[in-house]
Structure formats: C-alpha cells, structure tokens
Image (cartoon, helix red, strand yellow):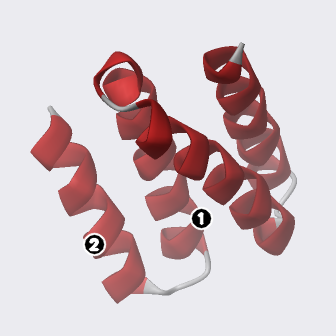
Amino acid sequence: DHEKVAESYSFIGGAYCSEKKYSEALVQLKKAMDIQIRLGVPALLALSKTYNRIAAVYECTNKTEEAAKYYRQTLEIQ
C-alpha cells in the first residue's frame, strides 16, 4: 500500500542522513513527501515526520532558510 511505500522512502532517507549522504536523503524524503501529500489526511502524521527529516537535512547542510520552511510546515500539521 502507498502509506508503507512512503514510510519506507522516509526511513531510507533518514538512514542516508545518518550516513551524511544528504543529497540521497533528500531524494528519498521527497519521494515520501510526494506520496504522503497525495494520500492526504490519513498520512498527515507521517508527512509531519518527513517534513521534520527534510528540515534536519537542510539544517545539516547549513541551508537554514530551507530548514526553517520545513520546520514551519511540520508545526502547521501538528
């Protein structure tokens, strides 16, 4: 099902981030995000976690404006 696929992309993105492979992390996280946005309400909690992971990647790469954008999106969902 699509929720599990999105969750898998998000976890893979998190793993890449842990390995400091930031560009690969963003690719996977944005795949998760696209699916979660399409799923809508049932995936909002997962989307919030994905936004948070994307923000963390941007923070680690000193792209603070992008990080802030995704952190704000996380807060808007919660």
20 up-or-down from 23: above or below:
above
Q: How many marks?
A: 2
Label 1 Cα neighbours within 10 Å, binned few <14 / some 14-19 / many ≥20: many
| Image: 61 above or below 78 | below
Q: CA distance from mark 2 to mark 1?
A: 11 Å
Q: Residue at x 67, y 22 (%)?
A: 2
Residue 41 vertical placement versus 69 (above, below): above
**Local crowd size for mark 2, using a 10 Å CA cut-off: few (<14), some (14–19), many (≥20):** some
Identify the residue shown where x is 82% and y is 38%: 12
Look at mark 2 in the image and give the residue it sits on.
68
Instruction: Measuring from the top left, give residue 19's x and y in whole percent.
Output: 87, 53
Q: Is residue 73 left or right of residue 46?
A: left
Question: What's the amino acid at mark 2?
Answer: Ala
Asked if disc 2 and disc 1 are in contact, CB closer than 8 Å, the reply is no
In the figure, is residue 7 to the left or right of 22? left
Local secondary structure at mark 1: helix
The image shows residue 5 at horizontal and vertical percentages of 75, 25
Which residue position is annotated with label 1?
57
Residue depicted at 28% across the width and 24% down the height: 41
Name above or below for residue 46 compared with residue 60. Answer: above
Q: The residue under label 1 is which amino acid type?
A: Val
Looking at the rendering, in which quadrant would you find the C terminus? top left
Residue plotted at (12% across, 47% down): 76
Where's the N terminus, which quadrant?
Answer: top right
Mark 2 / mark 1, whichever is N-terminal: 1
